[in-house]
Image (cartoon, grey):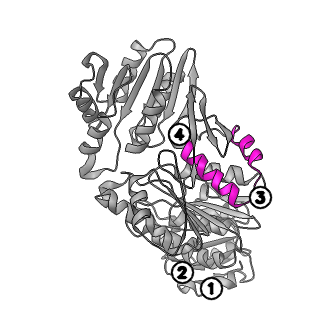
Amino acid sequence: MLIKDVLGINNAKLIMGNENSSLINFSKDTRTINKNDTYIGLKGENFNGNLFYEEAFKKGAKTCIIEGITIPEDIKTKYPDRNLIITDNTLEFLMNIAKLKRESINVPIIAITGSAGKTSTKNIIADTLSIKYKVLKTSGNLNTNIGVSLTLLEYQDEDIVVIEMGMNHKGEISQITNIAKPTIAIITNVGTAHIGYLKSRENILKAKLEIIEGLKDTLIINNDNDLLHDWYQKNNINQKIITYGIDTKSDYQATNISYNNLGINFTFKDKNVQLNCLGKQFIYNTLVALIISELFNIDLNKVLNKLTTIKPSPGRMELLYNHDITIINDTYNANYDSVYYALDALNHFKGRKIAVLGDILELGDYGEQIHRQVGNLIKDIDLLITVGPLAKYINDEALKNGFDHTKSYHFSSNKEAISFINNIKEPNDTILIKASNGMHFNEIIDNLKGE
């Protein structure tokens, strides 16, 4: 993409430089700028990236794209070999040039959304596709309109693109899918994440289904999810739909599931699948990867071998060890579904099982209700430790349902919980640490690791 290809988009004007220069390696962060990169200034709630264009030039950026800034007269003299573009709105400009780039991408684009499991599913799909293909995927969880746009602008010569689509509000997936125009879309589940904004799971379903608006071909859905299953049964859309599941009869299913302290085994098409991951959610993630691998004609035996090498991302059901204690680090984020899966995995361990649970955030008026629902899950563990004002409802509901009060403890701070855990931990304990990232439960993890 050359500068001259984008001039006029959102009234973009080249005020200095060469219109035949290439726009490559887009970045919105001056801390990661490299030589010849393209810097785009974006406004956030607490910062204005447009103010840092000169810092980007100093770090080697070839081109800067900004809005709403008066440019000093000496900039052209100071940076004679650089390009500076002014536009009315840098965010809209970014999305529009990503749409333009998408029109030139003639390879399959796979998009993943859902209340939980998006990043893990994206990673396992990309890993298995890489057996045969060159794959571009979104970095980390950069799943917003900005992150997806930057991913598309990274495209060079890859065979397949795998992107993650996230949302907090209605209309966000609609915007992203109409930028990316995916060939294949996957909905992992519909849970309670962001229910504080959307007010009901039914509204969350509608928001996730916005992905269909830009979809070119196949939709893949988790048929075990109640809302997705009901929608699939009742709706007749002009779209190819593939279902997967464990408990519900589906096009692709996992059977003969067994658990151990190191992972999961299950049967898929008469083949044994071994995962070095914990939790039922990784079975679902893997089923999606197996479907995608079949659609793209990758040898199943090679896929099965690849799956044995895949480990969860840090903070996502990550197994850690310190002497004789097993730690399940699931602190990256939390919602009702992920807590359910984490507790289910904990129950498959031998020895004393301890759950340390903190607040699930972004639930709005549904905070107490969801945390009480989590309290209903507390049954077959040896100790329950909760931290935070919302997590108190987990504790209360567990006790209300008959959980032993001598095995249930609540604290208002991580510091108090750490002190207590240090006093009661024993060899052969398995300790699950689970909360929304904003609860900073990494402090508890660091203590258990001895750091």
State which quarter of the image contains the C terminus.
top right
Earlier residue among tags 2 and 1: 1
The structure residue drawn at horizontal position 57% and vertical position 56%, both measured from the top left corner, is: 251
Mark 2 surroundings: few (<14), some (14-19) or many (≥20) residues within 10 A: many
Q: Is residue 240 magenta?
A: no
Q: Label 1, secondary structure: give it.
A: loop
- Inter-mark Cα distance, 2 to 1: 9 Å
From the image, tell me which residue sits under label 2.
87
Instruction: Give the extent of the magenta segment.
Output: 283-309
From the image, tell me which residue sits under label 1.
7
Residue 158 shown left or right of residue 100 in the figure: right
From the image, tell me which residue sits under label 3.
133
Q: Amino acid at mark 1?
A: Leu
From the image, tell me which residue sits under label 4.
316
Q: Quadrant of residue 24?
A: bottom right
Earlier residue among tags 4 and 3: 3
Point out the residue furthest to the left here. Answer: 400
Q: Marks 1 and 4: CB-CB under 8 Å?
A: no
